[in-house]
Amino acid sequence: MADLGTELAAWLDRLGLSGQLAAAGLPTFERDGGAVRWRDPASGDELDAERVAELDRALRSVGDDPAHGVPVELVRLRRDAEVRQTLLDGGWLDYAGVARRRGISENAARFALHKAAERRGVLLVQHEGGTLVPAFQLDDAGEVREELLAVLEPLLAAGVDPWRAWIWLTTPAALLGGAVPSDAARDPEEQPVVQRAAVALAERSR
């Protein structure tokens, strides 16, 4: 019969959540032949049976039945990772791309974007040493859509993680009844609702 560490690893594998452990700051596991070894995220030391049991209880703590509990935070991290990959697959421009839309030099575009970011007027996302400009916020001329300025400002002022802001603005939002914020904001009647939802998200993030 498999020990608890092996069963826990197999459970997370079945849920497709093993890859999110490190991102959540949780112990990770490695397989050594037929054995599973759990490692502390800080020290790298192998967890003893007591700590594995604590981890198992923590991951199964959501819901009424521990046998079928789902680690919600890991599910959210997996979803965010999947959305991030989708956004990276063509949902952004670099400085050169913005420059082409605006008909200006790349240096001028870089300067203008960073000045706008200082005013909380554009969302910039850092990724692998570069700066991404999420495309949803720009019009055909490369300028930030006017109706999004009041939506971006509270998110940026509150220091909401740029990735989280990008994901929230481009995926269905519970605060908007399942509407996509950046799309709903195009409707003049819905734009104030989107702004209030952004303020609510910003307040929760402080």
Image (cartoon, rainbow, N blue to C red):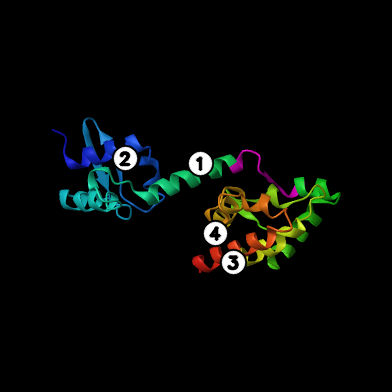
**At x 38% / y 37%, what residue is drawn?**
16
**The magenta stretch spans which residues?**
87-96
- Disc 2 vs disc 3: which is toward the camera? 3
Report the residue marked by disc 1: 82
Q: Position of residue 107 (x, y in %)?
A: 79, 54
Report the residue marked by disc 3: 199
The local crowd at label 1, few if under 14, some if 14 to 19, many if 20 or more residues have their Cα within 10 Å, is few
Whole-angstrom CA distance, mark 1 to mark 4, is: 17 Å
The local crowd at label 2, few if under 14, some if 14 to 19, many if 20 or more residues have their Cα within 10 Å, is some
Q: Position of residue 179 (x, y in %)?
A: 60, 50
- Tell me: 195 left or right of 95: left
**Residue 187, relative to residue 78: is it above or below?**
below
Sequence-wise, the earlier of marks 1 and 4 is: 1
Sequence-wise, the earlier of marks 2 and 3 is: 2
Front in this rendered view, residue 11 or 48: 11
Report the residue marked by disc 4: 161
Sequence-wise, the earlier of marks 3 and 4 is: 4
Whole-angstrom CA distance, mark 4 to mark 2, is: 27 Å
Q: Amino acid at mark 3?
A: Val
Secondary structure type for disc 4? loop
Secondary structure type for disc 1? helix
Residue 19 image-quadrant placement? top left
Sequence-wise, the earlier of marks 1 and 3 is: 1
Quadrant housing the N terminus: top left
Whole-angstrom CA distance, mark 3 to mark 4, is: 14 Å
**Residue 121, relative to residue 56: is it above or below?**
below
